[in-house]
Amino acid sequence: MKNDSLKNPAVAVIGAGMTGILMAIKLREAGITDITILEKADKVGGTWRENTYPGVACDVPAHMYTYSFRGNPEWEHRFARGNEIQKYMEKVAAEHGVSDQVRFNEALAECHYREGKWYLSTSKGNDLVVDFVVAATGILHHPAYPDIEGLDGYQGAMFHTSRWDHDVSLEGKRVGIIGTGSTATQVISEISKTAGELTVFQRTPQWVCSVPDKNYSESDKAKLRGNQGLMTKLSERYAFIFRNIFTAAVTGNKVAHAFVNWTARRNLRKSVRDPALRAKLTPDYKVGCKRLIFSSTFYDAIQRENVRLETTAIERVSERGVVTKDGVEHALDVLILATGFKPFNFMRPMNLTGRDGLSIEQAWAKKVQAYRNVCLPGFPNFFLMLGPNTPIGNYSVIAMSEVQSRYVLKLIDQWRQGNLATVEATEEAKVRFNSYIKAGMGKTVWVGGCQSWYLDADGDPAMWPYSWEQWVKELDQPDLADFHHSAPAETAPLTPWKKVA
Ligand code: NAP
């Protein structure tokens, strides 16, 4: 809502993915006009722009994976495909005038705080001074390459799923894929239809729940067009189910966990009849300890005649293929790395320094933590969207980032009203918040003895261990007692954007 008596801060939003688009829209709605969005790539969309692998889809129902203020009657499937979501992101960004504000192909290189302002330099050599920085840089975007001997010497085509090489045809080829996570199961379901032979290298089996997909017909879509209320209802219905079954199951609700456990085990029993294959696909850890996989196609795919599940550990990669510990060389034309991401990098690598020259590397040297997921002690007027401990098991990150955006705007609003010039979470508040997070972990399934990307180097899950309702409540109103905030002083005029080179 525009209010002319409020001050108008200069805000830099880093990244034009789902959260960057959202943040830009919400800042504009609040009447903030001086917004710069820096995007390293040539398009909006973030993860949905980067992940173009065959089978890419969102395993959270599409009507729940939408901005609450902009339902999408055009979803083609219950589980939207990657290109549908990319199209939706581009559409929303264009409709709200966000695309016009994005500086494409311009990454943030330097970001330093000095006396109430942030000084930014970009990959194009442009400088910028702003009052606030919002890092909307996402969680899972730095590919994790496996540390396997000989990988670099492999002579066939090889790529990570998030860097898919569409020039490489898989038709009739001998293809190997390392990994059986959410990404791999989507890829395997799709490429098993065309590959000549597909060898799936599985280190650890995963629990898979089957939630049937659905194609939305023209009449389904027609009912929703122009009816935001109906789309909101649909979204809320899915959200209610996901919260009360899947989120509850992983965060300590025994009844919900028993149900999901039964569902996953039944799915495996009914879908895979061969006891030997079923044994190989049966995890030895609790359902939900690793991120639950939703797929109604993976078990069919793994049983296709041209697909082989290899469970002998990988010893090394040769020039021709993968060599397993039993000495067998699996000759391959193409090797796909579905080996996940480095989830603790967040906005790094970036030369980011806060108050008194504190670098982000120093701040996170011992542990990657934040206060209420978004604020970092030592980094005034800086907010990290989807920061540490944001993810809520199998829930929509759009919903989470909407809650965070409201929280951030409330803090910025304090600045706009002239109540403060800088706002920075205290170290004490961060420690208290993280003790509270840790206290909740004991009842979750993530600490159930499995390895997963959820866990940091100390074995602590970087997840939200409580309910969705608790999350919403906690991020409702910022408690200013948890922040250092300096009184407003005469603000110097901002240095305008200038092209240096
Ligand atoms: P992931 O869940 O981290 O899975 C990585 C896979 O690679 C695991 O099977 C892992 O085995 C295997 N692996 C890693 N290094 C290996 C090595 N050196 N040797 C053998 N195997 C190795 O990664 P992801 O599948 O890309 O998924 C990451 C996250 O992205 C998901 O949990 C989800 O949050 C998100 N995602 C979401 C969707 C969606 O539809 N919403 C789709 C895709 C991804 P181990 O299990 O033994 O470690």
Image: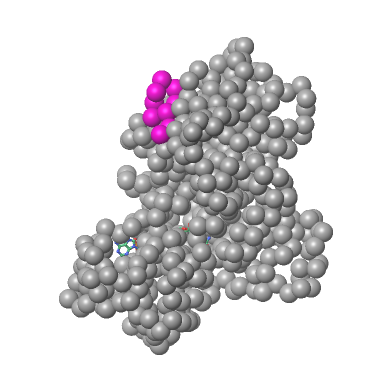
Q: In the shown orientation, is residue 476 left or right of residue 6?
A: left
Q: In the shown orientation, is residue 228 left or right of residue 47?
A: right
- The image quarter in which residue 160 lies: bottom left
| Colour mode of the rendering | one colour
Q: Which of the pair 429/374 is nearer the observer?
A: 374
Residue 409 location (% of width, % of height): 64, 33
What is the residue that sits farthest to the top in this orientation?
Answer: 490
Q: Which of the pair 190/119 is nearer the observer?
A: 119
**Residue at image x 53%, y 22%?**
117
Q: In the shown orientation, is residue 347 left or right of residue 411?
A: left
Residue 263 visible in rendering: no
**Residue at image x 65%, y 47%?**
99
Q: Which of the pair 427/382 is nearer the observer?
A: 382
Q: Which image quarter is the N terminus in?
A: top right
Residue 25 part of the magenta-drawn span: no
Q: In the shown orientation, is residue 395 left or right of residue 187?
A: right
Residue 79, compared with residue 382, is above or below; it is below
- The image quarter in which residue 411 lies: top right
The quadrant where ligand 1 appears is bottom left
Residue 401, compared with residue 50, is above or below; it is above
- The image quarter in which residue 79 lies: bottom right
Residue 104 visible in rendering: yes
What is the residue that sits farthest to the left in this orientation?
Answer: 327
**Residue at image x 22%, y 70%?**
318
What is the residue that sits farthest to the bottom in this orientation?
Answer: 305
Residue 131 location (% of width, % of height): 58, 25
Residue 414 location (% of width, % of height): 65, 24
**Residue at image x 50%, y 70%?**
54
Residue 209 location (% of width, % of height): 51, 70
Residue 353 part of the magenta-drawn span: yes
* Magenta-highlighted residues: 351-359
Q: Which of the pair 17/122 is nearer the observer?
A: 122
